[in-house]
Image: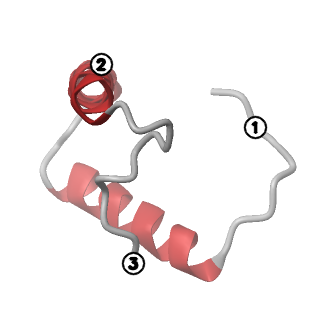
Amino acid sequence: MEMTTAVTTDQQLNKETLILRFCFDNHVSPSDLDRLAGRLAQMEAVADQRTDTGNQHDYFPSY
């Protein structure tokens, strides 16, 4: 995994911590996450194709 110098917000850090806790508690492996990332990418591609508004991912709610 490549590390960047981007600033992480508290909200993003909280979300990442939640995901990491879930993975740890449920014995989710890095290979499981890789597989899930591929599935998420496929779902986003389908949603992008359906919306095709030029504003990619505008169907996701922002919190």
Q: Nearer the viewer, residue 12 or 60?
A: 60
- x%, y% of residue 18? 33, 68
**Residue drawn at (54%, 68%) of the image:** 12
The residue type indicated by label 3 comes to Tyr
Above or below, 34 against 23 in this view is above
- x%, y% of residue 41? 33, 24
The residue type indicated by label 2 comes to Gly
Position of 15 compared to 7: left or right?
left
**Residue drawn at (61%, 81%) of the image:** 10
* Label placed on residue 63: 3
Q: Pointer 2: residues within 10 angstroms few (<14), some, or many (20+)? A: few
Between marks 1 and 2, how big is the CA–CA gap?
20 Å
Which color scheme does this rendered protein use? secondary structure
Cβ–Cβ below 8 Å for labels 1 and 3? no
The residue type indicated by label 1 comes to Met
Chain-order first, disc 1 or disc 2:
1
Q: Secondary structure at mark 3?
A: loop
Q: Secondary structure at mark 1?
A: loop
Image quadrant assignment for residue 7? bottom right
* Label placed on residue 33: none
Chain-order first, disc 1 or disc 3:
1
Figure quadrant of the N terminus: top right
**In the rendered image, which residue does mark 1 sit on?**
3
- x%, y% of residue 37? 32, 27
Q: Secondary structure at mark 2?
A: helix
Say which of marks 1 and 3 sits in front.
3
Q: Nearer the viewer, residue 20 or 52?
A: 52
Q: Nearer the viewer, residue 6 or 20?
A: 6
Q: Pointer 3: residues within 10 angstroms few (<14), some, or many (20+)? A: few
**In the rendered image, which residue does mark 2 sit on?**
38
